[in-house]
Image (cartoon, grey):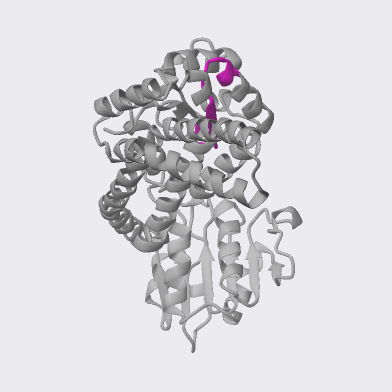
Amino acid sequence: MRITENHIQIVGVDFRTAPLAMRSKFAFSDTQKIEFSSILLELSCPESAVLSTCNRSEVYFVADEDMTAEVRLAMLRYFGATGFDDALYSLSGHAAVNHLFWVTSGLESAVVGEDQILGQVNDAIRFAADSGSAKKILNRVFRDAVTVGKQVKSDLGISDIPLSVSYIGIKKLSLTLNGLEGKSFLVIGSGEMGRLTVKCLVDERAGHIYLCSRSCGEKELPQLEGQQVELVPFADRYNYIPEVDGIITATASPHTVLTGEKISARTKPLCIVDLAVPPDVDDSVYNLPHVNVINVDELNTVSAENLERRLALKTQAEALIDIKIGELENWLFQNKVDPAIESLNRRCGKIASDAERFLFYKLDLSEREKKLVAKMMEANLRRLVREPILWLKKLDDEGKQEEYITVVKELFDIEETEEK
């Protein structure tokens, strides 16, 4: 592997290694990110970035040798989390970079393919760059990870395959009614699923929305500015059915809340989406003319099928990630010779400057002649080091690369302090 095992490293905790209460112990505020980057600097880790979400807290850092044990200890001490060591995992080299790419692409999420993490990774590296903890290497690694995450999302559409039962229900409702825009709906149940349903209807530009539940009050009304959402008494729910095109019901009732004999005869289609378990819709409703009922079993089947589709796309996403990591590995490998090349160029510049100073002192030259001499001096010195630089850039063997860098330093008398 061209990404050396001790170059890019991670210490972190996520939803697979620890429950929420334990993960919360390692949640970083912005101030703590800056403070911890200073601790990493003292541990000889010149670059770092922190990704902290509800599902994970990960510290990415660059070091010349394996520093994962030291960073694990520093993280435990910083958060006063003695005894939580088993919750932390460590990765280095290729495994660390691959992990970041998978995370950014939504392949390491609790819900495969979710795309919220993409923005969170982007925010993490932007904060690290702005605060000065992330530099050339991590900026490039994170930028490539975000790029491939966007590619997985846009090219494969993995995030566009819905898994939420309520969201799938709204989509099937829209398909049945040939769109939701301008149509009226009755939402029964003001719990979390009911509120999400109202939001989905608003996003689809639905018209009038009636919202009711046994405990519905003003505090239950979703904050949807400019949207016509009307609270109605639960007892009056049947009175509004003739006025609507669709019903979405999601109560926690142990009994059905809609029965066939209480629903007025329809002359136009009515679509009912029953998200409740146990069902809110009585079996008698299924036999009513012009009424189509979609129940949670049907929606769960679609959700399971969609999950299979996402998992199938995961293989294609892995292929995209492998290609991008290959490109990144080449860049990181070549990047190792950059300091030696920069030092070589600086050495040439110093030699040219010293020679020019001596010649200009000894010879009476015009400004035009001085510029000409300076250009010739620089061109000849560049030609002198051109072959060593080309050899350094062509090398694809890590052992030979280190050997050639050492030889170049010795031949051109480049000190370690000068290189840095």
Q: Is residue 369 above or below residue 352?
A: below
Q: Residue at x 65, y 70 (%)?
A: 210
Q: Residue at x 33, y 32 (%)?
A: 3
Quadrant of residue 410 in the image? Answer: top left
Instruction: Judge by depth and name the residue closer to the eye, 370 or 68.
Output: 370
Percent position (x, y) of residue 277? Answer: 44, 52
Instruction: Judge by depth and name the residue closer to the eye, 109 or 183.
Output: 109
Q: Is residue 104 above or below residue 99?
A: below
Q: Residue at x 60, y 64 (%)?
A: 198
In this view, the residue farthest toward the top is: 82
272 lies left or right of 383: right
Is residue 36 visible in this depiction of the protein?
yes
Instruction: Judge by depth and name the residue closer to the eye, 20 or 338.
Output: 338
Q: Is residue 53 shown in magenta?
A: yes
Q: Quadrant of the N terminus?
A: top left
229 lies left or right of 316: right
Which residues make up the magenta segment? 39-57
Percent position (x, y) of residue 8? Answer: 41, 29
Percent position (x, y) of residue 363? Answer: 62, 38
102 lies left or right of 222: left
Is residue 420 visible in this depiction of the protein?
no
